[in-house]
Image (cartoon, grey):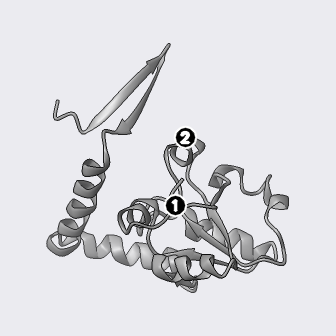
Amino acid sequence: EARLVESEKDGLYVTYRIADESVSRFLMALREVAESRLLEFDRFAEAMAAVTEGIEALSSAELAQLQKAGEPLVLDLRPTEEYAAGHAEEAINIPLAELDERLGEVPVDKRVVAYCRGPFCVFAATAVTRLREAGRAAVRMEEGYPEWREAGRPVA
């Protein structure tokens, strides 16, 4: 009723999307409030730290600098629909569910930086672990696409 999301019906399926950029900013602000105010958040943060332990993370600013130098392959792990709605410029999309079968698309001789929905999305950390096991040099971006876009970085 608050019109924070829009929907599109296609037969039996309904696709929902955030109404506009202001809703995305609202959700990021709400996450910040939750981080500082909710006691339960500490447990969640500990669980996230366990998932990302030993996985190097770059800030979006560091990734932007590396992109200027043409260094990394930027990998967006979000579902195809989310990628199509917007992504970091030059990022390629391999949804996490397809990573194992599409591993051949990820060069062995190029550093990979993986990102997903935000700092608490485990897609990137999971992908980095799988990529490293397959012999790729991979790290994750600390933030996700919403923070990338909000920082004014190039998007497509």
Residue placed at 51% from the left, 83% from the top?
62
Q: What residue would you read off at disc 1?
A: 116
Q: Residues within 10 Å of mark 2 (few under 14, many from 20)?
A: few
* Residue 148 placement (x, y as % from top left): 43, 66
How many numbered marks appear? 2
Q: Are marks 2 and 1 in contact (CB under 8 Å)?
A: no
User: How far is mark 2 from mark 1, CA to CA?
Assistant: 13 Å
The correct choice, above or below, for 88 with respect to 54 in the image is above
Question: Which secondary structure, mark 2?
Answer: helix
* Residue 84 placement (x, y as % from top left): 56, 43
Q: What residue would you read off at disc 2?
A: 81
* Residue 124 placement (x, y as % from top left): 57, 66
Residue placed at 51% from the left, 45% from the top?
82
Horizontal side, residue 126 vs residue 27: left or right? right
Q: Nearer the viewer, residue 125 or 107?
A: 107
Quadrant housing residue 96: bottom right
Callout 1 amino acid: Cys
